Image (cartoon, rainbow, N blue to C red):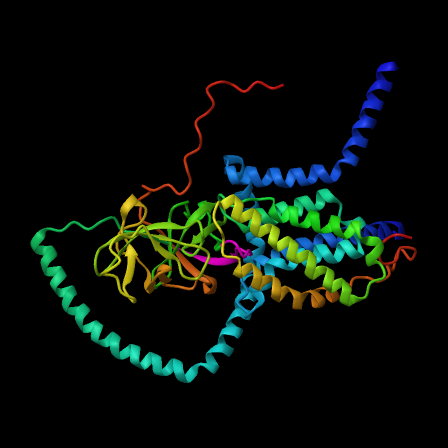
Amino acid sequence: MYALLQRLDRLAYAVAPGLAIAALILCSLVPVRVPWLPAIAPLLPLMAVYHFSLTRPEALPRPALLLLGLAFDLLQGGPGTPIGVSALQFLLMSEVVAANRRFVAELSAFFLWFGYAALAAAAVAMAWLALSGLAATIIDPRPALAQYVVSLFVYPILGWVLGRGPARDPFNPTTGPGGRA
Amino acid sequence: MALRDTVSSTAGSFATLVRRFALTLVVLAAVGAMLVGKADTVIVERVRAAAMDLVTPVLDAAAEPVAAVNDFVAQLRDVTNLRTENARLREENARLLEWQSVARRLEAENIELRALSNFKDGPRARFVTARVVGDSGSAFMRSLLLNIGRRGGAMPGQAVVTADGLIGRIVEAGEVSSRILLVTDINFKLPVMIERTRERAILQGDNSPRPRLARFQAVGGIQSGDRIVTSGDGGSFPPGLAVGAVASVGDGGIRVTPVADGTRLELVRIVDYGVTGLVTNPPPPPPPTHPVRGR
């Protein structure tokens, strides 16, 4: 019984980041009319990808990020809209974070926030370029810019919420946050 | 034995190759998906519809609590605007009473004229009311998800209206869900006319809250406030359906304010006029004459 619980618990711990991103993708589709919320909702999954790439990179394998991004794109747009842009955003964001893990390990929250600002700017700019290129017109960048700016204020809150996950796993005392013993 | 060794060593080197180029492979997959999505094949449409059908029941289940939150926010906003709203409604009421008398007179006249000319009415429209369960969730698209699909009678190409007029058209229909492209979306184009002057134009969205009038010849006669209605050209929608009003006429072109703010809708009506002249999507490509040979 204890072994089963332990295994279930380990499983839950392993898939938690992926499920959190999937849940945020669903949240971003809910038509809530609270002022300012729709403005940032589409960037919530990207924030979560950044957060978990920092804290739990082993729980976000590349194929999972690819699938989550493709699902997000499929749900966002109608016929003719490109799929794969979010997938590319997720993948590149997690790769850049992974490549700089040695440096980000000791950084303060402020610099992590700064990192989010820089990477999200690049991701949003890339999406805008890709969508404009594929549509062969210049899409108005202002809504995306507004979204980005508002997301800068929301990231610390979301990061804090996501960081409230189990700090220490009750059934697996050897695996702390980060999952590596 | 030698064969088994060869197979296992080949599999091993293949696995190493995949591992080494894992990033390249997934990035290529994402870029490939972009191109495939743009090409808009039947398979992509099926996958899209399946994804929509999968998620819509979840969003539909969340619709009640979401509506409660939205009502609460709307009430807060209403309380702050009570006085100005009251004044506006009084004025509007006075104006509408005048219109009512005009409409009564015209209705009587219309009945009389129809009787005289043996007028034959067009086909009656069929309405299905649907709940908005999802936004597009993107800064680059303007669309909504509805909880009615093919089973409920929704088909691509149908008009979606509110009490005020047209808000968009259905572009994609799954079994239990469908997607509306709003008039403000960059991919939305619709033949319209200026109600007052009967001049034709194309209404074209550009993701801004105010779509513009394109391919419009005589700019002189148009005024701010003119009503824009569907022209019926192309056979997609019946003529005379309200779309919006001219907001501004200037160097940047003619801008139109749509009848309803697409981001504040909760319930909409799908209208089946029984006319499907204009197909939203290009027809599927003809099957290849020469079978593609595998390598």
| Residue B83 appears in the rendering | yes
Q: Is residue A177 left or right of residue B222?
A: right
Residue extending farthest bottom? B83
Q: Is residue B194 above or below residue B27?
A: below
Residue extending farthest left? B116
- State the residue at coordinates (66%, 55%): A46
Q: Is residue A16 magenta?
A: no
- State the residue at coordinates (68%, 50%): A90
Q: Is residue B150 left or right of residue B107?
A: right
The percent coordinates of residue B178 (x first, y second) are 47, 49
Q: Is residue A54 above or below residue A91?
A: below
Q: Is residue B134 magenta?
A: yes
User: Magenta segment range?
Assistant: B128-141
- State the residue at coordinates (71%, 53%): A19
Looking at the picture, tell me which residue is in the foreground, B180 or B289: B289
Looking at the picture, tell me which residue is in the foreground, B129 or B32: B32
Residue extending farthest front? B251
| Residue A45 appears in the rendering | no
Looking at the picture, tell me which residue is in the foreground, A50 or B167: A50
The percent coordinates of residue B35 (x first, y second) are 56, 38
The percent coordinates of residue A25 (x first, y second) are 63, 55
The percent coordinates of residue B176 (x first, y second) are 50, 48
Q: How many circles with numbers are drawn on the protein? A: 0
